[in-house]
Image (cartoon, grey):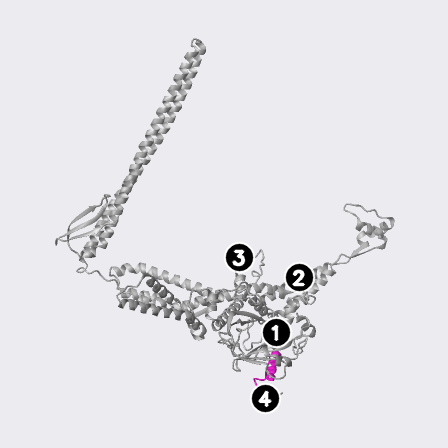
Amino acid sequence: MDDEALDTAGAPREDSAAYWMSEIKAARDREKDYRKNGQQVIDIYSGAKVKSTPFNILFSNTETMAPALYSATPRPVVQRRFKDEDPLGKAVAQAGVRMLEYLADTNFDGYDTFDEGMKGVTMDALLPGRGVLTVKYDSELGQFPPKEEGDDPVEYKKSELVCVDRKIWNRVVVGYAKKWSTVPWIAYEEHIDEDEAERLFGKEKASKIIFDELDEDDPDKSREKQREDKNSGMRKTALVYQIWDKHGGRKIRWVSPHYQDGVLRTDDDPLELSGFFNCPRPLQFIEKIDDICPVAIYELYRNQATELNDITRRLNHVIRAIKAKALYDSELGEDVKRLLESDDNEFVPADKSSSLAAEKGLQNAIWFMPVEQLVNVAEKLILAREQCKQVIYEIMGISDILRGASKASETLGAQKIKQEWGGLRLKPKQKEVQRYSRDMFRLMLEVAASKFEETTWAAMTGLPFVTTDQRARLESTMQQVQLQAQAMAAAGQQPSPQQMQQLQQLQMEMQKPVWGKVLEVLRDDVLRSYRVDIETNSTVEPEAVEDQKNIAEVMTALGQFLNGITPLVVNGSMPFQAAQAMMLAITRRFRFGPEIEDYIKAMQPPKPPDDGKDKAAADATQKAAAQAQKFEQEKTQGLAQIESLKAQLQAEKQARDMDRREAAVALREAKVQIDEERLRMAEQTAMERVNTKDQVLSLKQSTTDKVRSIQDAAQKREQQTQKDAGGKIEQAVASTAKLADAVSNIEQYINDLADKLEKIGGREVIAVDRVKGEDGRLAKVVRRHADGTNSEVAVNN
C-alpha cells in the first residue's frame, strides 16, 4: 500500500481504495447470513430444491401476497399543498403530474419501466428481504457546427430521460448504521468488460485492471454459480463497486479489487438530490428497531415449513406403502390366478386339491396384509399437515378468505371477520409499497427538474407555458407596441384594429405561466415542499375520501342551522351576532371549519330598508308587484280559458266519434233492411212467378241507389263534423297564440318598468299612454308627469 493511502495513524485514508475495500468487506460480513439465507429462499421459490421441498409453501404464500401488495402501476398525484388560490402552484402541479405520468410509461427499449421495477423490488422484498430501485438520468448529446473556422462545435442535448434501474438484491452493499437516515454510503456491485472500463476510467487505468472469467472476490457464489450468471459466456469482466459516499463529501467513487493503484474515479454529486442517494429507503417488510440488516419473511416460518415438508415426505412414504397384498395356500395354485383374471359374474371351478385346501374355510387359506394401521397413520398425517399450514398462515397473516378458500359451514360474519383481520395484517405491507412508489416519483421529479431543459419539459408535458426566452421576446415586443401606441396618441391618431388585436394577443401570452418560474419552484427543495405535495393515487385516496366526508358533514350542519335560525334573525327575535357565534362554534368542530372561519366572521347583518330614501323605489316596487299580480291573474284566466277550450274540443271530438258510430250503425241497419228486402222479393218472385226479368233488374237498381244514398249521407255528415271540429281547433290555437303574446308583452312591460324606475327619478305619473306599432303590438309606453314632462319606455317585442 502506498504511503499516500495512509493517514497519520497508519490507517487507510477515506479516499483510498484500501479503505473502501475494507468497508465493503465489513458490510458483507454483517450481511453474510442475509445473503446466504436469501439465496436459499430464492432456490426454494424457483423450484431448485424439489426433493427437499415437496410442499412449496413459500411459492404459495408469495404468489398470494405479491398481487395483494402490488398489482398495477400507481398514478402520480401532484397537487397544491394547502388547496388555496395559487396560480404558480397550480402550474407547478400540472407540470409535475404530466412529467411523472410520462416518465412512468416511456416505452423506450433498453430501459426498465416503472411497473417492471416496482414488481421486481416487491418480489425482492418478499423473498430475500430487501428491494432497491434507483433513479438514473440519461441524455444524448449532439453538436452544432462551428459558426466560424477554428471554433469548437457547440454541444447540446438531443434527448433526455429519467428512468429506473433495479439493482440485484445481493449486489447492494450498505454502510453501517442503526437507521436509514444515518447511512453513510451505499455501494452497487457491477461487472464490466474492458470496453466499458475504457469508457468510464480511460484507457490507461483500464489497461491496469485485471479482467477474469470469474469473480474471485465474490464470496457469495461458487465457481459454478458464477459461470451460470455469465449470460455472455466466458466474457472476461472485472468486479467494480460504485460507491455513493454521502458522509465523505457527497462524492461518487469507483473502486475495484482488481485495480491496486487506488480509486478508479471520483465524481461530484451528479444528480444533486436533497437526500443525495439515488434510491429511497430500501423496501423491506420486516423492520428492526435497532438494525437495518434485512431478513427474509421465510425465516419467520422456516421451522414450520421444514416440519411441513417432513410431514409431506412421511405421508408420501405411507401412501406408497398402502397396497393390496395377500398370501394364499399353494394348494389353491392356478385357481387364484384364474379367479383374478376372470370377468364379472364368471364362476371359476376349483380342482380337487383346491377343494381340500378350502375345507378349513377359504378365508383361512388366503391372508391379506392389514393396511388399516397405514390408513389411520395417513389420515393423522394429513390432519397434522393442515394444522401446520394453519400455523404458517397465522404467522404470515394470510386468512382463508384472502386465499379464496372458505368452508360451507362458515357464516357471513365469520368470513367478514377473517377478511378484516387479514386485511389488517396486510395493510402495513401495502402501505410500505405505496411509500416506496411515492418516494420513487419524488426522486424522478426532482431529477427531471434539475436536469431537463425548458424545451424538454414543454415537449414532454405538452402544456402551453412559455419559455424564459419566449417571455423575454414577448416583453420586448410589448414595449415596442406600447411605445407605438403612445406615439400615435401624441399625434392624435387612433390605433388600427390590427394593432389592437396584436396587443390583445400579447396580453394573453403574457398571462401564461413561464417555465423558468415553474422550474425554479421544482428545483428548490424548500419551495417545492412548501407549494406542492407529491403522492400517488393509493396514498391520496384515503385522505380525499376523508376530506369529502368532512365537507359533507360541515355543509349538512350549516344547512340545518341556517334553515332554523334565519327566520329568527330576519324577524329580529335573535341578534345577528348570536347566530354568527353559534355558526362559528359549529364550524370549529370540524377539520374543514378553520378554512371558512374568516369568511363567517366577515358576514354582515341584514340592513333594514330606509323609508325616506327608498320611498320612490318602494312605490315603484309596489306598483310592479300590483302589475305582477294583475299579470298573474290574467295568466290564470288565460290558462283557464285554454283548459276550457281543451275541454270543449274534447267534447266535440267525443260527439264526432259518436256521430261516426251512429252513422256506422245506420249503415249496417240499412244493409240489413236491403238484405231482408231482397229476400222478401226473391220469395215473392218464386211464389208468384209473375215478375219479369226487367222488373227484377229495376228493383235491383232502386235498391243500389238507396244504398248509395245512405252512404253519401253518412259521408257528408262525417265530413261536416270534421270540418266543424277543425275550425274550432284552429280558433283555439289562434286564441292561445294571442294569449301567449299578451302574456309575453305583460312580462316585458313589467321587466322594463322595473328597469326604468330609477331613471324616472320618483316623479309622480298622472297619465300613461300606450302606443302601438304597425303590427298592432305595444311599441312604447309614454308617461306624463305632474311637472309637465314626459318619459318614454320602449317595449321590445
Q: Quadrant of residue 521?
A: bottom left
Q: Earlier in the sequence, mark 1 or mark 3?
A: 1
Q: Assign a secondary structure to mark 4.
A: helix
- What label sits on residue 412 in the rendered view? 3
In the image: residue 598, left or right of residue 795: right
Query: What secondary structure is found at the residue carrying circle 2?
Result: helix
Circle nearer the viewer, 2 or 4: 4
The quadrant of the image that shows the N terminus is bottom right
Q: Is residue 16 magenta?
A: yes
**Is disc 1 placed on a helix, strand or loop?**
helix
Q: Residue furthest bottom?
A: 8
Nearest the viewer among 606 and 519 is 519
Residue designated by label 2: 382
Can you tell which mark lies on residue 170? Answer: 1
Q: Which residues are magenta?
A: 7-30
Q: Give the class, few, some or many, for how many residues have Cα within 10 Å of label 3's Cα (few <14, many ≥20).
A: few
**What residue type is disc 1 on?**
Asn
Which comes sooner in the sequence, label 1 or label 4?
4
| Gap in angstroms between the C-alphas marked 1 and 3 | 45 Å
Quarter of the figure with residue 311: bottom right
Judged left or right of residue 100, residue 352 is right
